[in-house]
Image (cartoon, rainbow, N blue to C red):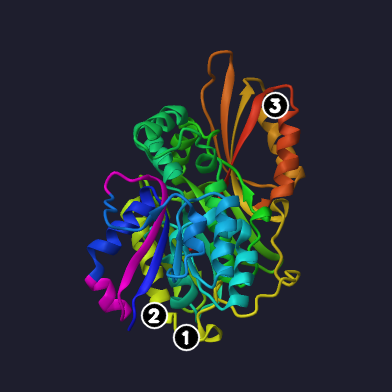
Amino acid sequence: MKPVRVGICGLGTVGGGTFNVLTRNADDIARRAGRPIVIEQVAHRSIHPDCDITGINATSDVFEVATNPNVDVLVELIGGYDIARELVLTAIENGKHVVTANKALIAVHGNEIFKAAHEKGVIVAFEAAVAGGIPVIKSLREGLGANRIEWVAGIINGTGNYILTHMRDEGRAFEDVLAEAQALGYAESDPTFDVEGIDAAHKLTILASIAYGVPLQFEKAFTEGISRITAEDVEQADNLGYVIKHLGISKRTDQGLELRVHPTLIPKERLLANVHGVKNAIAIMGDAVGPTLYYGAGAGAEPTASAVVADLLDVARDISTDHHYRVPYLAFSGIDEDVSQLPIMPMEEITTAYYLRLLAVDRPGVLARVATILAEQGISIEALIQKEATEGELVPIILLTHRTKEKQMNEAIREIESMADIAGPVTRIRVESLDEGE
């Protein structure tokens, strides 16, 4: 069979890894695909130092690849929103299949891109957009196709997991570990997307859409970062039998879908609690299969390239198949843009348990007033730790509550923070059991 000709846009970390994997494993890839997959053209502004493109048609104009009649598949690895969107839509308009590792592009513009691709009968593949080399999209879209998905929860940003792991293991402050992560190249100079949950929300949006058959709705995802987590919180969580992880969580409920990213206390015995360093892991609960876990490298040149090339293999296998018979982009055929039957729930309507940490003046009646405020909002206390007074006679108080609605907790925290005997803001971390059905 004739070769599938690929144009790679971007030869940075992932692009260079993709180029090297395609060339190094060309024979095995051809045997798996049933035809050769060859690099027809590359577009780049800079080249990864491990990538030798001698003899390859190269350009600095990515749109030259999108309009090249000799290119069958455009691999978009430039990142970002605007130029990537224009590039992908141009490639689709020119009848080219697309493989991308761009989670932001898919989460924000995926509905538009998939509509255009369907109209042109081309494939858009994006396994590498979520969790790097872990084949979670294929597993969710195809391997778990018999299941009604109940919930998805994951550590889907390695930077945040690295920071929280070292805070726990070494008792260090957030700022200290973040600086180390930046020095090691695990965190960007501007770490906002990673530590504030935006990157994870992009990925969770994609997973939720595939899990439940709804359009991509990134703008409705709740995000909260880890920058306010202290070594004290990590220690107290450990004392209570929990580990703090920065999780993306999506659940199906009678009221709709939850879509949220935030620091979370999870029991120490849970599988996700034992995922350390820069690794990623996603737990998925299906009604038939029960709990499943997908673990591995969530970033890096060749782990991510592994997913990119796997998508190219799928394209090579399906390129001659009528597009009506291919696996749908988001797993479900004919996704209805009317999401009223399964809406994304506002955060204030979500129910969970809570960890609260506050500093109170060491005075009789303060703790009783805090307990009264919680009770007035229908919030019951599961555990309480009152430590010795600090300098200035402030007493750290740690509370673990039973499950309650977010809006009740918001009101309770507002009232507690208005008390004259409470110093500074109340720290709130949500608690999830993530029942694995044992």
Quarter containing the N terminus? bottom left
Nearest the viewer among 299 and 272 is 299
What type is the residue that disc 3 sits on?
A: Gly
Residue range in magenta is: 27-50
Reading the image, the residue beneath label 1 is 321
Q: Work out whether residue 249 can be spotted.
A: no
Query: Which quadrant of the structure image shows residue 231?
Result: top left
Q: What's the residue at 46%, 53% (across, down)?
A: 156
Q: In x, y percent, where is residue 182? A: 40, 33
Secondary structure of the residue carrying numbered label 1: loop
Side of 400 relative to 16 (left or right) = right
Badge 3 density bin: few <14, some 14–19, many ≥20, Cα 10 Å: few
In the picture, measured across the screen, residue 318 lies left or right of residue 345, that is: left
Residue 270 percent across, percent down from the top left: 42, 56
Q: CA distance from mark 2 to mark 3?
A: 71 Å
Secondary structure of residue under mark 3: loop
Identify the mark nearer the N-term, 3 or 1.
1
Q: Is residue 62 magenta?
A: no
Q: Residues within 10 Å of mark 1 (few under 14, many from 20)?
A: few
Query: Does the CB distance between marks 3 and 1 fall below 8 Å?
Result: no
Q: Between 421 and 299, which is closer to the camera in this rendering?
A: 299
- Say which residue label 2 marks: 317
Name the one closer to the observer, 42 or 395. Answer: 42
